[in-house]
Image (tube, helix red, strand yellow):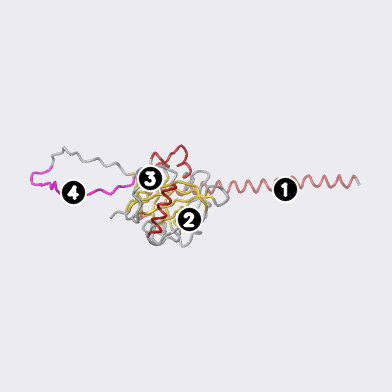
Amino acid sequence: MNRRRSKRKNLLFPILILICLLIMGVSLYKLITITLDYKQSENEYDLLKSYTTERKEEVPEDPNNEAETESEEVDTDKPKEKKAERCPVSVDFRNLQIINPDLVCWLYIPVLDLSYPVVQGEDNDWYLHRTFEGTENFAGSIFIDAEIQHPFQDPHTIIYGHSMKNQTMFGKLKLLLQDDLYKKNPVFWILTPEGDKKYQMLDIRYTEAGSDTYTVFEQPDEAYVTYLNEVSAIASIENNNLPEISSDCRLVTLSTCAAAEGTARLVVQGIRSEEP
């Protein structure tokens, strides 16, 4: 009887060791796979950033410069045209759209040095785990909600991105709330082939997936203005450069997961006023 028990114990020990080794092997494989995914994604998006160029600061004209010819008359009554504000970086959209025709815009958040192309697919699944160049990768792409018909022209445009542990993609968004970092420059830029759009940060908050935060509006109607006023009323950040709330305002929501599991989301909402 004791010999049988001894044999069972002798057999059980190597089996347990084998199980532990298998578990360790699977975990190591997953870790290596995730690490390679992170690296592959970083390399691809770093290469894509080569399609952006830092703009040089324009030197203001010298009001005392009298180098004008005598025949040139200056109309002092004519109002000066206001130059459109430009983002500190420019984007080579023509060549990027050759790589991926789904490119809609480029997102740039100066205070985070966050700079990525933004795409829009036929649904919200395609780019969830596919990079800009279509490679299957957990990091996926930063993409616009497929329900948005006319991004940045529609009242509310929603943009999704993964919160990666290495702070790539939307992994840096949470840093905006650390030590009130957003106060240094509470803006983000949406660059399109048609021009640069500057958004003032309206709010940064945690919410739930499927909450009213993700409401899509077909028209900038009364319900939309009410929504904007409600967001403004609960906003937890300070920004003195916000435009006056009206139906002319356009809203962009940047959304990412707040935790590895669950339905909590971190959103950064920015607003701008449509130029007449």
- Regarding mark 3 in the picture, which secondary structure is present there? strand
- Which residue is most to the right? 1
Amino acid, disc 4: Pro
Amino acid, disc 2: Asp
Q: Residues within 10 Å of mark 2 (few under 14, many from 20)?
A: few
The overriding secondary structure of the stretch rendered in magenta is: loop
Instruction: Give coordinates of residue 60: x percent, y percent.
Output: 23, 40
Report, in whole angstroms, how far the alpha carbon at label 4 lies from the one at label 2: 44 Å
Q: Across the whole image, how many numbered discs are drawn on residues?
A: 4
The tag earlier along the polypeptide, 3 or 4, is: 4
Quarter of the figure with the C terminus: bottom left
Report, in whole angstroms, how far the alpha carbon at label 1 lies from the one at label 4: 80 Å
Q: Is residue 14 found left or right of 268 in the rendered image?
A: right
Return the residue at label 1.
19
- Which residue is most to the left? 71
The tag earlier along the polypeptide, 4 or 2, is: 4
Report, in whole angstroms, how far the alpha carbon at label 3 lies from the one at label 4: 29 Å
> Are the two marked residues, 3 and 4, in contact with CB atoms closer than 8 angstroms?
no
- Regarding mark 2 in the picture, which secondary structure is present there? helix
Q: Quadrant of residue 9?
A: top right
The tag earlier along the polypeptide, 1 or 3, is: 1
Say the numbered circle drawn on residue 187.
3
Front of the two marks 2 and 3? 2
Q: Is residue 43 found left or right of 17 in the rendered image?
A: left
What is the magenta range? Answer: 68-87
Return the residue at label 4.
79
